[in-house]
Amino acid sequence: MDQDHVPEIKTVAYTRSAASMDRGDEVSAERTTRVVTAGLRGWSRAKAQRQHLFRVSRLFISCYYVYVSYYGLFILDLNDIEFPTLGDHGSNWRWKCVSVWNLILQISYFIYCTVFVDFANSGPGKLWIKPHLRQNKKIRDFVFISLVFPVSIVVCVMFWIICAINKPLLFPNEMSKWIPDWYNHAVHTNPIALTLFDMATTKHQLPKKIDSTAGLFLLSGSYVICLLYNKFMTGRWVYLIIGEIVSSLMEVIMYFAVTAFVIPFICMMIGYKLCSWFSNQRIKEEQKMI
C-alpha cells in the first residue's frame, strides 16, 4: 500500500469514529431526556393524585366536624342536667368554653379550605372562586398559622395535662356521666392530629409574624374578656381551676398573661418552624425528581 494514502485512511477512520461517537451521545442524551421526562410526568401525575386525595380528605374532615357540632348542639342535651360542682354559669354556658371556640375555628377553617380553595377548579368555582384564589390562600394561611394551629395545641395539650393532674377541676364527674368518650376525644384530641395532617399536606405561605401575633392576641383577648364578664355577672369562673389558682388581681393578670398570650405565642412560633420544615421537605423531594 502506498504510504501517502495511510494518513488519509487514518483520517477517514477517525472521522467515522467521531461521527459514530456523536450519534451515540445524541442517542444516549435522547434516551436520558425521555427517561427524565417520563419520570417527571409520572411524578406530576402522582402529585396531582395526592393533591386530589388531600382535597377529598379535607372535605371528609369538614363533614366530620359538622357532625361533631350537630351532636354537641342538638343530640347531647346538657341543659336539664344539674351540675352541683359547676354551679350557675349563666345562660349558654357551653359557648364560654375554650374547647367550643376551638371547635368553631376548626369547622370554619376546614369548610373555608374546602369551598374557597380546594374546589376552585370545579364548575361554579372557575367563575366565582378561581379569580380570587390567591387571596383566598393568603386568608387560609393566615388563619391557620395565627389561630388554628396555636389554639388547637394549647386547648388539647392543656386539657389532657390538667386532666392527668386533677380531672374534676376541668371536667367534672357530672359531665363525664353524660358526654361519651368519643366526643371528648373529638373535641380535645383529634384537632391536634387533623391540624398536623393539614400542615403536612398543604403548602402554607407564612404570613408576617407581627400580623399573626396581632391576630392571635386579638382572639386571646376576646376570650379573656368573655371569662371576666362571666365572672363579673355570675361570681364564678367558667373553669374551677382558675379559682383554685388565683386569689388576687395580680395573680389573675399573671394567669391570663401566661395561659392566654405567652403559651399560645410559643405554640404559634412552633407552627412557623414546622411549616418551614415541611416546606423544605417538599423542596428536597422535588429536587430529587429533577
Image (cartoon, rainbow, N blue to C red):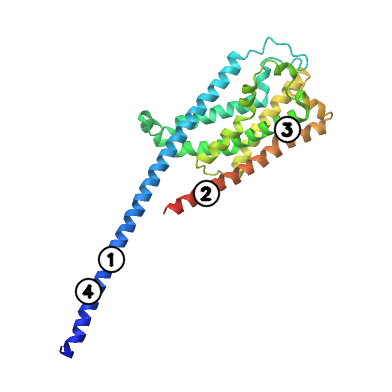
Please tell me which of labels 2 and 4 falls first in the chain: 4
User: Disc number at residue 281?
Assistant: 2
Under mark 3, the amino acid is: Ile
Residue tagged 4: 16
Mark in front: 2 vs 4: 4
Question: Could you tell me which residue is drawn at 69 percent across and 25 percent down?
Answer: 226
Residues at discs 3 and 2 in contact (Cβ within 8 Å): no
Q: Tag 4: Cα neighbours inside 10 Å, few (<14), some, or many (≥20)?
A: few
Image quarter of residue 44: top left
Local SS, label 4: helix
Q: Tag 2: Cα neighbours inside 10 Å, few (<14), some, or many (≥20)?
A: few
Residue tagged 3: 161
User: Disc number at residue 24?
Assistant: 1
Q: How far apart are marks 2 and 4 (CA)?
A: 49 Å
Residues at discs 2 and 1 in contact (Cβ within 8 Å): no
Question: Could you tell me which residue is drawn at 22 percent across and 74 percent down?
Answer: 16
Q: How far apart are marks 3 and 4 (CA)?
A: 80 Å
Under mark 1, the amino acid is: Gly
Q: Considering only vertical position in the picture, is 17 above or below 177?
A: below
Task: Give the image location of residue 54, x and y in percent.
Answer: 47, 35
Under mark 2, the amino acid is: Gln
Q: Considering only vertical position in the picture, is 191 above or below 68?
A: below
